[in-house]
Image (cartoon, rainbow, N blue to C red):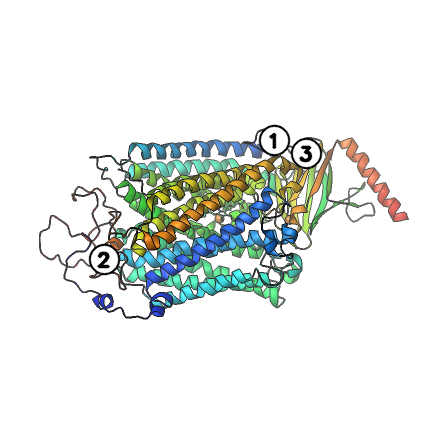
């Protein structure tokens, strides 16, 4: 089933003589699959760290001033007697956002899946630049360790928010944080190099290394999404890096780029940060959209609805993403006329998001839906992303953003897109490609329990945050009970905290399932989901070099339930049935 | 705030009700879209679940549908833009601010609000100016014009019950206005993380009748001049 018996040039040498040492094979590996898996372990670790930080914050928000159980280990500088100090709260809120965005979600989506999937889905033996790829991972690790270590330095970690607005982030006297704030800059500068090395690699690989017959419009949607994401990374990260270097200079050598003295401008930081930051939020959703499209088609046993519209919408998002950054700055003191313009561009960018949603619904229409765990998570993505997109309309409308900006309403918005969207997309992707990565199936029952509990507790945790925001609860607030107008909603804060803990506890099921399945899971077949794309033609797990023979692509990736096939799927590399000729001529790798 | 499911704070500024009504308009529109999408999703999930002997429809899409839903979404966002723009300018564009009323200087610094009043003569920089800390006293029914400054880091001047928010940025002087429709005591908060005391950077807004306010200004000016004479 899985391989086509075509006499064709193969990477067989790599397959049969794999005599690399353990270190070359698993640690300093140039194999894109190993690097993807390394990124997987790294970013899941940071996902857990970020989650722990969040739950610590939720303790304080639910029961302000009550000693954290076991909080004594934090020490007097952070939480004397177990009661956290405001400076520690600021460190938590900053590092939670930083770890989640830069060290968990972004590497999960890109580091893991761009590496793992792109060569396999386009039928290539590896990345275009395998050693650059290895360097990319081994640059990300020290960046992460540096960020982690900043908790231990005197003064603690950065505490100016993940958005790090100057002058607070630039002047130690203002934040009370000296070294931590600098380590934050350095770590992200280093991580930026890692992202750039990855991005050039993904772009080159997609352009140059597609298998014969893999035209642009036969590319699986995850590849399209990751390709567009890589371009966004390539263009956006240097802006962040530039801004970080200027901020670091302000912190260390007395420049005043972002300080009001000597012609500096605090707003300049915000413009630079958000000029990077808005494309960044699309970096954080586009790959998940790609995975979900793939999995929805597979689960529904139907071609993806409106493939060209799906690609077009992603390209539109990638362009429009550059001209909307000011919607983060409506209240910043920026000229209100600019605010008016940014509102319009922001409303327009909602259109491609809507197009994608409707096409996902179209994909389900008339399907024959199988509810495997990846599918459940993909369906959750669609339903939750809708909420995040719609809450975006409230904050995009400038007058309504006046009361809602910098409140929990925005916190709710970002968690519906990033947890409800990106993270459900990641759960879908991990459970879907796990069998390919590790050659074993994850446990289906545990997967379903984890899914349903996560779905429930996610909503119970984050939906009420819309209400807290409407009630006027500011974000990054150490103690809401300080404000008279927030005292009536304190029970809601307790409710959110309880559910946040349950949501966190639920993730242990995933951790257990992941680790257990790694060693004890049922052995996976080559193509357990009866999917069409090329990675399922390679063995599970694929050997070094991936394919025994270079696959030849005859059709698009989503020909599910095609009348041309007796079964309800038709792999991209299956030679057309009605052509009985012994060896089809080599299809040109067209563009 | 009797309704936990719609805990909007009391609404006591002139433009507040317009903002709230736009909020509810968007809530209706997004609410309808939300229900439509989720109901359709659940309906499809149930109706098209895998069943023995039925194959999925082999369809790659439908151009007419694409055009319809793209146009519909455009129409909705176009409407939202149209509905928002005038209100945004009314609240934020200095050229459209109402004339007259009370002028105040508000300076934010870690972790306090300093409010400077022009005193009886209505002019700043004269001897009868006086200052209040974390207290914003204003008359009802009169436009209040504020010039916002910050001394150290960025803060955000947030009056939840007046539906007003404006960052205060070091090196900038940012104008803002609002007009109270009701007397009473309300909240002044800081909405931008500004350091370890951010959470307690809180003030009170005290709205009095115009007569009471006039009396209060007189009283404050006397205290001030008495202080100066001493
Ligand atoms: C329909 C599409 C969307 C619209 C109209 C939209 C609009 C907005 C607006 C106007 C803000 C600023 C709110 C404020 O600070 O007052 C915002 C914040 C944010 N959005 Fe979205 N958004 C959309 C989709 C997304 C997606 C897909 C993501 C990421 C996956 C995302 C992530 C974020 C984040 C992280 C912030 C907060 C940044 C911060 O201040 O910390 N948004 N969004
Ligand atoms: Cu944005
Ligand atoms: Cu503040």
Q: Residue at x 42, y 53 (%)?
A: A283
Q: Are marks 2 and 1 on the same chain?
A: no
Dot 3, how many residues are within 10 Å of its Cα: few (below 14), some (14-19), or many (20+)? many
Task: Say left or right for A283 vs A540.
Answer: right
Nearer to the camera, A531 or A365: A531
Whether tag 1 and tag 3 are in contact, CB under 8 A, the answer is no
- The reply to whether callout 2 and callout 1 are in contact (CB within 8 Å) is no
Residue at figure coordinates x 12%, y 56% from the top left: A584
Which secondary structure, mark 3? loop
The chain containing the residue under callout 1 comes to B
Residue occupied by mark 1: B1
Q: Position of residue A436 (x, y in %)?
A: 29, 54
Marks 1 and 3, how far apart in space?
19 Å
**Residue, disc 2:** A590
The disc, 1 or 3, on the residue closer to the chain's N-terminal end is: 1
CB of mark 2 near ligand 1 (< 8 Å): no
Q: Is A584 in front, or is A459?
A: A459
């Amino acid at each position: 089933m899985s391989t086509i018996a075509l006499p064709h040039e193969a990477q067989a040498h790599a397959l049969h003589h794999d005599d690399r040492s353990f270190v070359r094979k698993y640690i300093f590996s140039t194999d894109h699959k190993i690097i993807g898996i390394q990124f997987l372990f790294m970013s899941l670790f940071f996902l857990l760290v970020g989650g722990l930080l969040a739950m610590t914050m939720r303790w304080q928000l639910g029961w302000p001033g009550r000693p954290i159980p076991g909080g004594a280990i934090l020490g007097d500088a952070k939480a004397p007697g177990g009661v956290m100090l405001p400076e520690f709260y600021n460190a938590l809120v900053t590092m939670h956002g930083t770890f989640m965005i830069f060290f968990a979600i972004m590497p999960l989506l890109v580091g893991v899946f761009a590496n793992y999937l792109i060569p396999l889905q386009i039928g290539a033996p590896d990345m275009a630049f395998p050693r650059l790829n290895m360097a990319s991972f081994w640059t990300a690790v020290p960046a992460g360790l540096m960020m982690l270590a900043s908790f231990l330095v005197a003064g603690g970690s950065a505490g100016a928010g993940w958005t790090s607005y100057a002058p607070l982030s630039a002047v130690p006297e203002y934040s009370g944080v000296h070294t931590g704030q600098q380590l934050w800059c350095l770590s992200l500068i280093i991580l930026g190099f890692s992202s750039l090395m990855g991005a050039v690699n993904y772009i080159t690989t997609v352009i140059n290394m597609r298998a014969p017959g893999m035209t642009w419009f036969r590319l699986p949607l995850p590849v399209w999404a990751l390709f567009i994401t890589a371009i966004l990374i390539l263009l956006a990260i240097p802006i962040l890096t530039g801004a970080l270097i200027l901020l670091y200079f302000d912190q260390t050598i007395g420049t005043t780029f972002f300080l009001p003295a000597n012609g500096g401008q605090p707003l300049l930081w915000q413009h630079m940060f958000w000029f990077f930051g808005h494309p960044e939020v699309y970096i954080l959703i586009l790959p998940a959209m790609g995975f979900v499209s793939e999995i929805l088609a597979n689960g529904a046993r139907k071609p993806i609805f409106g493939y060209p519209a799906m690609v077009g919408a992603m390209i539109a998002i990638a362009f429009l993403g550059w001209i909307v950054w000011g919607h983060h700055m409506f209240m910043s003191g920026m000229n209100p006329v600019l605010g008016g313009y940014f509102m319009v561009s922001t409303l327009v960018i909602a259109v491609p998001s809507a197009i994608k949603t409707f096409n996902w619904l179209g994909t389900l229409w008339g399907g024959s839906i199988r509810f495997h765990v990846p599918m459940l998570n993909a369906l959750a993505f669609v339903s939750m992303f809708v909420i995040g997109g719609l809450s975006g309309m409230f904050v995009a409308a400038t007058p309504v953003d006046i009361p809602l900006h910098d409140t929990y309403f925005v916190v709710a918005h970002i968690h519906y897109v990033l947890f409800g969207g990106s993270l459900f997309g990641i759960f879908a992707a991990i459970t879907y490609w796990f069998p390919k990565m590790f050659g074993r199936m994850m446990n289906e029952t545990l997967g379903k329990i984890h899914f349903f509990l996560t779905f429930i507790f996610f909503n119970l945790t984050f939906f009420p945050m819309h209400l807290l925001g409407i009630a006027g609860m500011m974000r990054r607030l150490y103690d809401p009970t300080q404000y008279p107008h927030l005292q009536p909603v304190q029970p809601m804060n307790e409710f959110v905290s309880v559910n946040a803990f349950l949501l966190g506890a639920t993730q242990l099921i995933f951790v257990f399932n992941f680790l257990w399945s790694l060693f004890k899971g049922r052995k996976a077949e080559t193509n357990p989901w009866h999917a069409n794309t090329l990675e399922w033609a390679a063995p599970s797990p694929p050997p070094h070099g991936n394919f025994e023979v270079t696959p030849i692509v005859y059709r698009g990736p989503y020909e599910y339930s095609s009348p041309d096939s007796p079964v309800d799927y038709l792999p991209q590399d299956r030679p057309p049935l009605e052509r009985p000729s012994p060896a089809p001529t080599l299809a040109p790798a067209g563009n | 705030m009797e309704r936990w499911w719609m805990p909007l704070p009391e609404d006591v500024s002139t433009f507040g009700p317009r903002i709230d009504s736009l909020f509810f308009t968007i809530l209706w529109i997004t609410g309808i879209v939300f229900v439509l999408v989720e109901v359709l999703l659940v309906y499809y999930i149930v109706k098209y679940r895998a069943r023995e002997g039925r194959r999925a429809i082999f369809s790659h899409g439908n151009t007419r549908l694409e055009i319809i839903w793209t146009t519909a979404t455009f129409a909705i966002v176009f409407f939202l833009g149209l509905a928002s723009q005038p209100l945004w300018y009314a609240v934020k564009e200095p050229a459209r601010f109402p004339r007259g009323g009370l002028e105040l200087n508000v300076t934010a610094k870690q972790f306090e609000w300093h409010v400077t009043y022009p005193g009886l003569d209505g002019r700043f920089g004269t001897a009868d100016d006086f200052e209040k800390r974390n207290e914003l006293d204003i008359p009802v029914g009169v436009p209040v014009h504020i010039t916002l400054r910050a001394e150290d880091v960025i803060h955000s001047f947030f009056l939840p019950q007046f539906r007003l928010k404006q960052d205060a940025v070091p090196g900038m002087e940012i104008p803002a206005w609002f007009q109270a429709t009701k007397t009473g005591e309300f909240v002044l908060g800081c909405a931008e993380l500004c350091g370890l005391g951010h959470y307690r950077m809180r003030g009170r807004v005290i709205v009095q009748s115009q007569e009471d306010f006039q009396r209060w200004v007189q009283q404050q000016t006397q205290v001030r001049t008495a202080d100066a004479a001493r």
